Image (spheres, grey):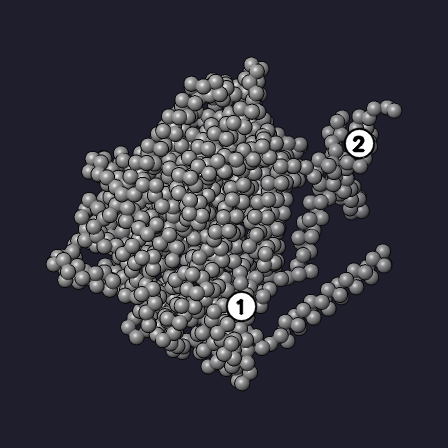
Amino acid sequence: MRNFRCQIKKFVIASFVMLISVTAGSASADQTIKIGVIGPMRYITGEHIWTACSIAAEEINKSGGIAIKGKRYNIELAKADSNEFSSLSDAISAMERLITENKVDFLIGIQFSEAALALQEVMADYKKIWLSPGSSHEEQCLRVAKNYDRYKYFFRCGPPNTIFAGRIAAHELMMTIEKVREELGIEKPKVALFRQTGLWAEANMKNSLKDVPKSEFTTVGEWVVSITASDVTAEMSAIKAARPHIIFSMVSGPVGITMSKAWGELKIPATLIGANIAGMSSPHWQATNGMCDYEATMNGIGRVEITEKTIPFYDKVLERTKQNPLYATVDSYDAVYVIKDAVERAGTLETDAVIAALEKTDYRGAMGRISFYPKGHKWPHDLKCGPGYVTWVATQWRDGNAGRKGL
Amino acid sequence: MLERILVNGLVTSGTYAVLAVGFSLIFGVAKIFNMAHTALYMITAFLIFVGTNQLGFPYALSAVVSVGATIGFGLICYALLFDRVKVHQTAVMIISLAVAMLGQEILLLTLSGHYRGIAPFVTGSIDILGVAVLYQHLFTVLGCLATLFGLWALLTKTNLGKAIRAVAQDSETANLMGINVSRVCLITMGISAGLAAVAAVVAAPLEPLHPGMWMLPLTMILAAVVLGGLGSIKGSVFGAIILGFAETIVVTAVPGGSFLRGAVSLAAMVLVLIARPEGLFGVVFEEERL
Amino acid sequence: MIDYIRWVYQWFKGEILAIPGRVIAVVFFTFLLLLPLITTSPSTLRFLIMACIFAIFAASWDLLAVTGQVSLGHALFFGSAGYTAALINIHFGLPAWITIPLGGLSAVVVGLLAGIPALRLRGFYLSLVTLAYPVILTGIIFVFPDFFGGEMGLIGISRLSGSRVGDYYTVVLIMAFSGFIMWKLSDAGSKVLRTGVVFHAIREDEIAARNSGINTVRYKLMAYAFSGFFGGVAGGLYIHFIRIAGPSSLEVFFSVQALLWAVFGGMGTIYGAIVGVFILFPLTEYLRIYEWGEALRFVIVSLVLIFILLFMPEGISVWVLDKIEIRCRRCKVVNIATRRNCRTCRAPLRLEREK
């Protein structure tokens, strides 16, 4: 019995020693800054977030890394599959694993809003700075306003929230209305509204209609479809029967593909514009068999000179993935540089100092001038949008390329 | 409005009907609750996609090859997996579910999770009763009708069909009458997988392909089969038609509420089953009634 | 006092140590209770907490399955209780130890409502009707987005307890306790409760059970109520732990998972469901450590499911217990499989041909 106890003691001591050496080992491994990249890695958005972060990290490491008080730090990336479309608990444990096992210093990633809200709790528990490139709902930043001390680690690096997205879509609609008026001589074009269910589309649609004067157009009706509807021919043929000049869409799910396909197949004589998230990515052309030709959508990036960094970045992504970058791609790419910029200005990796530096960010990235709203604003830590900051572009599909030529 | 409901309802219910009949057939004959049925549909769709878009075969050729491959896969699943644990119905259910998940994961790993499309077999549209109908839709409806008719002829006019129906009614007696029950079950599995594959051939060009596409139709065909009465082929067809039209009516009449299409048609199923617990065409022995 | 201790010792020796399955259960729970002494790694504790919550969920599914009612929509209980607990917590500020039982009670109400159509239905008809419930509830939630938070879900839910270790002990104890109660409720050999034997009778032959004077309607509804309550408790724990109540907890796949775990572990046994969760859930989590594992983990899990069920179609726990336990034919007492004679009545456990 004594012998047995002795062994237990030895085992306990041994495991303590091991534990200490492991923690000591990781503490002494400096000279790198670890960034955790989390996203639905088996889906296109996750792949793109990862590609963008890798490109940025390689560029920074090649040009000498991050300089903090004369010391050089290299960026090291850690990847985690959030699997957020099928399991919320999986996404949470992926994030926690990044923080506790991989011991990352910063986090970038996530797309799905419900998952983003759940993950904010994990972020707040561990006090890790997180730049989110994919999910758009403003609730995430309203939370920062409500409880700044708890959620101040969260920064939204795009896309524009629903208020701004609505405004961008309104500009797109206004441009199209003017074009129709100019070239077809129709004083008050008829507009059919087509959106999917859910807050995002509803809020965007409402906000964009608020910004376009009622006297400019007439609506012929609004059609609302499920985010996963596999057939919208019924809705589209109803729209065709209503004879609009413009179809103003607001869809983010797979229904975007179905919509473009039905629009093309039915040869509806109305121009399809608005926001179609599926329509921003390269596989859209194949998925619709080219039926999306001439469809226009607002987009986070096109191959146009938004800043001098846009086109080189665009080409790099194109070369690596054979696909156009998505908004999440450019957001993540810039997020890595924003971290570099903030850490260098703060001169330390200490969280509060970095947050203070991030709040003063004024960085010219590939998607525009990046800056966050300060504490005390309605949406603290949200991406500043509007003229002079991030504005987004509109791209149109032509011959298999969306926005490669640029509008 | 009425015409639109009619045309679009036919398209939706046609696909559901072919899928539901295949599911119902193998359940009736071999008592296998095959959760991988719509996964077979998905596999065929992706095989056609690989054939037409990546290998450059014409649509018809890759469709034929894919249907053959799917039937083979179905038979292998049956012989190696389902048949061996047939007495444990829930185990079969979970194994078939695992097969479906495996299919989804392999597709995710090899082809990645974004959406794809198959070029329609025929392009363009025609106006019927003032409704724009895609030729592809006509093709789907006619294909479904032809398949259902073929199945009906097979089941009623041939000896094999007689054997299948006999096994479905009472497999023990059928066995005593000299019918090779295990072979009939195998053949039925082949037919069932073939029906799922044919549904993909006629309907897959209509919807975006992705590795999770088996889940939604699975719910709907299960509902259709149960609504019509388990094991009744006629019932499955009617169940599919009712659910297909219920969906279309919701979408057309309440455009603002079309996200409710699944909920409404399932609610309709629940109501029918409360009124008629054995489904529309199901048979229940009097002593089993509760 | 000494007598009392001796009695406890005797009871422990006779009722626990002599039966291998119970020894495994006791060792397992002791291990869970002592685990925080070895490691307090948050991610380990997190996945064990999730495993415990899902174990309650799967076991509550199994409780319904004991009566032969295979539900394909068990997320109904999980989700509705989760939403109820979240709404009470957000609007009235009540703490978790009140909201979780209230959520459970709301699931009982939902369970009774759901159970009424079940009285007329059986077999796969019933399964399919239950499949429809969560889909319909999701529809309702989307119709009232302001109240239920729409697709984003409800946020701002309070914590389960102050710390991760606190959460862990809360959940492990609730899991052990509710697992034990569910097992007792479904135990056909119980001397205290007659629900177990009635539930089994209903599954075997409902008509015969009714002919024997059993009010099967009452017992079936009772099964729904209990199953709903424990499923609801799991839902309440879940939302207080991950701190969001969203529509993803009502998805069809979520319901199917309960069935998957329970059938894998051994259907109709309660402990089987817990075993199933504690094998499959850590497996998925463990594979994550490796880069190849993160990509392939669902492939591996599906293959494990297929192969285990192919060779142990009644579930892994039933198969294992069959190998290590043997029931005496005369007095029905469970013995370890290595014994030749029954430990109480000394009757030979196996009939052997004389050489």
In the rendered image, which quarter contains the C terminus of chain A? bottom left
Q: Is residue C273 visible to us here?
A: no
Task: Tell me the subunit letter for badge 1.
Answer: A
Kindly identify the residue that appears in the image at 66 percent across and 40 percent down: C317
Residue that numbered label 1 is attached to: A77
Other-residue count near label 2 (Cα within 10 Å), few / some / many at <14 / 14–19 / ≥20: many
Task: Kindly identify the amino acid type of the residue bearing the numbered disc 2.
Answer: Cys
Name the amino acid, label 1.
Leu
Q: For the image shown, how many numbered marks are present on the structure?
A: 2
* Residue lying furthest top: B177
Locate the N terminus of chain A and report the quarter of the image it occupies. bottom right
Residue A357 image position (x, y, % from top left): 44, 78
Residue closer to the observer: C75 or A27: A27
Q: Which residue is mark 2?
A: C342
Nearer to us of marks 2 and 1 is 1
Q: Is residue A40 left or right of residue C299?
A: left
Q: Is residue B202 above or below residue A1?
A: above
Crowding at dot 1, Cα within 10 Å, few <14 / some 14-19 / many 20+, comes out as: some
